[in-house]
Image (cartoon, rainbow, N blue to C red):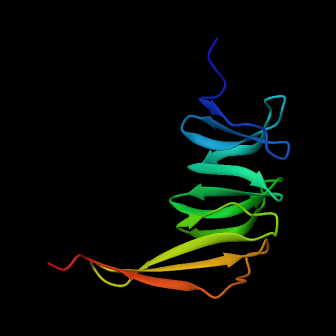
Amino acid sequence: MPLAYEAVGNLSEGLARAKRNNNWGFIDKNNYDIIPLVYDDVGDFHEGLAAVCFDGMWGFIDKNGKNVIPLKYNRVESFNAAGEAKVEQIRRTGMWSAEHRTVYINKKGKEISIPQVRQSGRPKY
């Protein structure tokens, strides 16, 4: 009998991360698919939201699978108990350079801190 999932995480807020055919989603404690397994990667639920990645961009969904914060970030951290998550967007500014913009957002996706911006580029010799 083939295994239903390639990988399964621990239950977090009633749902567990699950992987099948290289796609991630969420299942309940009875192994029923609750949120379709369509994502490249997912994080556990924290404060009612889970980070999800599709085509290399991250955002957040709720426990119904509704996209509540758009998939527009290059990196994200889970929401903390204060309802804040650290996110980063990287924007190319040249062939060898980029601008990294890091900020904290609330559970509605609104920025709640002053953005920290740093430049990166090709090493100088």
Q: Quadrant of residue 105?
A: bottom right
Foreground: 1 or 90? 90
Q: Position of residue 24 (x, y in %)?
A: 63, 43
Residue at position x 50%, y 85% from top?
117
Task: Give how far across and how far down residue 123 sits, in percent.
Answer: 23, 76
- In this view, the residue farthest toward the left is 125
Q: Position of residue 25 (x, y in %)?
A: 68, 44
Q: Is residue 70 above or below residue 114?
A: above
Q: Residue most toward the bottom? A: 114
Residue 63 vs 30, above or below: the answer is below
Quadrant of the drawing holding the N terminus: top right
47 or 53: nearer the viewer: 47
Q: Count up the numbered dots.
A: 0
Asked whether, in this view, residue 107 is left or right of residue 97, the answer is right
Name the residue: 79% across, 71% down: 107
Snapshot quadrant of residue 103? bottom right
Which residue shows up at 61% across the image and 71% down it? 87
Q: Quadrant of residue 109?
A: bottom right
Q: Residue at x 69, y 37 (%)?
A: 9
Q: In the visual, does 114 lie left or right of 120? A: right
| Image quadrant where one finds the C terminus | bottom left
| Residue 3 sits above or below residue 76 on the image | above
Q: Is residue 124 above or below residue 31?
A: below
